[in-house]
Structures are given as C-alpha cells and as structure tokens.
Amino acid sequence: MQEIKIGLEVHVQLNTESKLFCSCPTSQAEPNRNVCDVCLGFPGTKPVLNEKAIELALKIGYALDCRINKKFLFSRKTYFYPDLSKNFQITQLETPVSSGGKLNIKDNKIRIRRVHLEEDPAKIIREEDHVLLDYNRSGIPLVEIVTEPDLKSPREARIFLQKLQQILEFIYVGDFSKEGGIRVDANISMTKYESKYGYEEGLVEEKKGGVRVEIKNISGAKEVEKALNYEMLRQKNLLEVKRETRLWNEKTKITISAREKEEEDEYGYIFEPDLPVIELSDKILNEIQSNLPELPESKKRRFLKYKISPEIIDTLLTEPELTHYFEYLCETHNEKASAVLLAKYLKRTLNYHNLKLKDVDIDVRHLRRIIDLLQKYLITDDVAEIIIREMVGDHVKGKKVREPEQVLRDLKYEKPLEEERIRKFVLDVVRENTKAVKDYKIGKKESFDYLIGQVMKKTGRRASAKRIKELLKREVG
Ligand code: ADP
Ligand code: MG
Ligand code: ZN
C-alpha cells in the first residue's frame, strides 16, 4: 500500500503589454531586444510596478476562490545564476496577492495555498557546449499559483492543470499558445507501508519514506503527467529517496538530478526597498470582482439546460470565443443548430488548420446566415461544412473571408429543389414502389430508408434527407 501526495507550482506569464517593473514590451522579438537598464538590473535603476499585472493577478485570485490580501509588498530572493542579472528576483514571500483558495476536481477539493506575483528570469538556451541567454523574458510578469499537496495521482495532476488553464483562458490573463506561457514545478512524495513481522506485535505495517522530490520546469499538463509517472516508477525501485530537485527531459522522458533541495533561508529574502507597500481600495477590488468573466463551470451548467449533448458543450468550452459565438447565435437561432455548427463544422475545420476561432475573422452574422440556409433546406449539413471550410480557407490563404452566399456562387452551387417539387418526387416514388410502401406499412423499417434513397436519387441529392423524410412520412404515415 502507498499514499501519494502531489503539489504543484504553476507559473503563468501574464498577458500585459509591458514588463512587470519597466516599460519594455512583452511581445515576441529578436533575442535581447526588449531590454532596458531596469530589466537588465543595472546599478541605480529602480523598478516601477505595472498596475495591469496586479489586476490580472487579482482576477486569478478571485477565479480560484482565494482570500485577497488588500495590503502586500514585494521581496528580493537572492541567488546567483546567469538568468538573473540583478542577482535577485523580485517576488512575494510573506504577503502574496492572494491565498487560501480552491479548485474542485470532481469530488476532490484541491486547496490553493497562494497566488503571488514575480518577475520571470531570462531564458536560458542550452546548446551543445555553451548556453545562450535571452533577456527579453527577464521581467515578464508571472503569477505563481501554488497548491497544497492534495493531488493524489499523476492523472489527477493533469486534469487539475487542464482545468486551471481553461479557467485562466476564460478570464483572459495569459496566452498559452506561446512557448513558456505556462510552466510547472511538480512535487511528489510517496509514503510506503511495508509489512513487517514484529517480535511481540506480530504482523505490522511500517510507514516508510514520504520524502518530497521536486521536478522543475515542465511545459504542460500532459508532460507533468508523464514526468510524475516516471518519477513514481523511479522511486518505487529505490530503497531510499533523496530530497532533491530534478529536471524533466521532454526528449528522453526521464528526470535527472539537478541539485539538493535548497531551503527558504538560503535565499536570504529581504523586503524590496525600492517598491512601496501596495494597498488596494475596496472600489478597485469590487470593480475587478464584478467584472470577472463567467467561469467555464458556470457556463457549462447553463448550457446543459439546453438539450445539447455534454460532449458538444465540452467542445464549445475549449475556447472562450466559441462560447461567446454560441451565445450570440442563440439570441436569434435554435440552440442545438447553433451548437452543432460551432462545435462540429467550425471547430473541426479550425482544428484541421491548427487555428483558434479568435485568430480567424469570421463574422457571427455569416454564421447566422448559414443556419438560416440550413433551416430553409436551401443547403444540407454537408454543404454548410463546405462553406465553413471555404471561409476558413480564405483566412488561411490571407484573403478576405467571403460571405456564405458568395462561396455558394463561386462553387456554382445549384439551389435545391423547391419543396413542391420534392413533394412531387415523393409522390412519384410512392407510386412506383408499391411493394416497399406496403412492406413499410406492415412494419419493415428498412423499406422506409429504401424509399428515402429513391427520392434522394430523383432530387439529384439536392434536398436534405431530413426534409424528404418529413414529406415521405406525411404520404405513407
Ligand atoms: P518550495 O518548493 O519553494 O520549497 P513549498 O515548501 O511551499 O515551496 O512547497 C511547494 C510545493 O510543494 C507545494 O505545491 C506543496 O503542495 C508541495 N508539497 C509540500 N509538501 C509536499 C509533500 N510531502 N509531497 C508532495 N508535495 C508537497
Ligand atoms: Mg518549489
Ligand atoms: Zn526593461
């Protein structure tokens, strides 16, 4: 028997326009371009705090049900390493922006210990016989989210991270398509219980181990699961586990020892004298809290009230924009038709091109027209998907996205037959297939499908199966 404890430290780059303590941009650039005296740590320079970063950190605090610290300050964590040209990192120790939150994973409540702000160190690029340093990353605002060791398996750690990332996406605090947008340290300890034969007590269980190992700098939820699985296997085969920090190698899929675990006082934390104590007014806090976007879980609860399958709802919830579009479409159209158009046809096409809806210029009005065409039986589901493929294709080719009607004209699409004509075809088929009609009436369901097929043939596949079915039902009962 064994007990596993896992705790995570999640570093999230906040999507501010400028860095945490200077006005350098956070955008992509050639290495070492987005730098200045402050983020390179030149002597005599002083940090100026970016308010936007505080706002985003508070949003995270609220989204994770934390207590907000209305008054907080920053600290210097001193260490020597090439990614840290100042020789200290400005972070928070005693007073994180917020603490004491939670995130539920099914029945397991994962406690959030703290959410604090800090600056990102530079990026180290390891080459064969040397390292390169990119200080563009130095000073990018980070939020570190630390859980209590409440996770019980590598799988649960992955699910937690996916859920956390989804929440962060829905409150618009980070960009996770960026490399390094989210980085995780995973802590794991395994308590083993071994059976032993005691001289007086007989067979007893002895508790062994429970030493915490930290795996640093893992790049995503799936990698965290793999790293922890590897680590469990490694520890199972050890007589004694050392308390240490290890590194996960994504290529070889193993962890290697990096250093003995350091203790807090080795960093010689001191309060940051160049920054003031921050005091937040109730007005600001109320504003941030009341403007917090709706969280995915609450959206899901609302969407489940419509008669839409949970799978389709989960697909909508993979991106905030999909849910926004869904709500816009629902204002004018049937919920199910709207959800299917977005979660199936649009999402499938976006996935194919590795795109997000937010990156593509597709107007809600265009989607409304596609649903209109569908509901008037002017196009079939297949054609709806083709229109969407063409529209997304326009975006991929760097062209202006066409309107649905234009796509149809360009495809030389022939309008389907008018309802009256479809009905005539139905009557023709009924007349010509008396045996099949009779079979259907005495209960042979296949005969009905056969009749639909016959009508379809006659219409040159331009009428939808659904419409034919309705008309045919009306004729044969
Ligand atoms: P640091 O790693 O900087 O020393 P902490 O002591 O605050 O910081 O712990 C960091 C992480 O380690 C937290 O996510 C916490 O849940 C986790 N942790 C603490 N004790 C254990 C344990 N026995 N097993 C697994 N994880 C643990
Ligand atoms: Mg740590
Ligand atoms: Zn700078």
Image: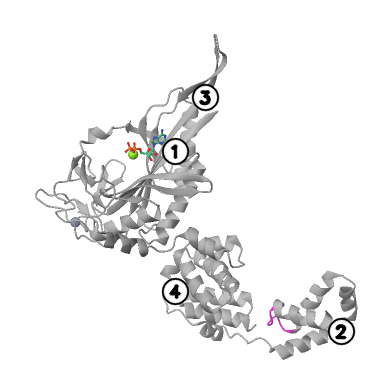
In the image, 133 versus 47, the foreground residue is 47
- From the image, state whether disc 1 or disc 2 is nearer to you: 1
User: In the rendering, at what x and y percent does residue 28 appear?
Assistant: 29, 60
Determine the CA span between mark 2 and mark 3: 78 Å
Asked if marks 2 and 3 touch (Cβ < 8 Å), the reply is no
**Up/down of 324 relative to 147, above or below:** below
- The kind of residue tagged 4 is His
Outermost residue on the top side: it is 199
Q: Is residue 284 visible?
A: yes
Determine the CA span between mark 3 and mark 1: 18 Å
Quarter occupied by residue 136:
bottom left
| Magenta-colored stretch includes residue 92 | no
User: Residue under circle 1?
Assistant: 6
- Say whether disc 1 or disc 2 marks the residue closer to the N-terminus: 1
User: In the rendering, at what x and y percent does residue 95 appear?
Assistant: 26, 45
User: Residue under circle 2?
Assistant: 432
Colouring convention used in this rendered image of the protein: one colour
User: Residue under circle 3?
Assistant: 193
**Neighbour class for label 2 at 10 Å: few (<14), some, many (≥20)?**
few
Asked if marks 3 and 1 touch (Cβ < 8 Å), the reply is no
Q: Quadrant of the N terminus?
A: top right
In the image, 426 versus 203, the foreground residue is 203
- From the image, state whether disc 3 or disc 4 is nearer to you: 3
Q: The residue tagged with tag 2: helix, strand or loop?
A: helix
Residue 395, label in figure: 4
- From the image, state whether disc 4 or disc 1 is nearer to you: 1
Question: Does mark 1 have its CB less than 8 Å from ligand 1?
Answer: yes
Q: The residue tagged with tag 4: helix, strand or loop?
A: helix
Q: Quadrant of ligand 3?
A: bottom left
Q: Which residues are magenta?
A: 459-464
| Magenta-colored stretch includes residue 461 | yes
- Say whether disc 3 or disc 4 marks the residue closer to the N-terminus: 3
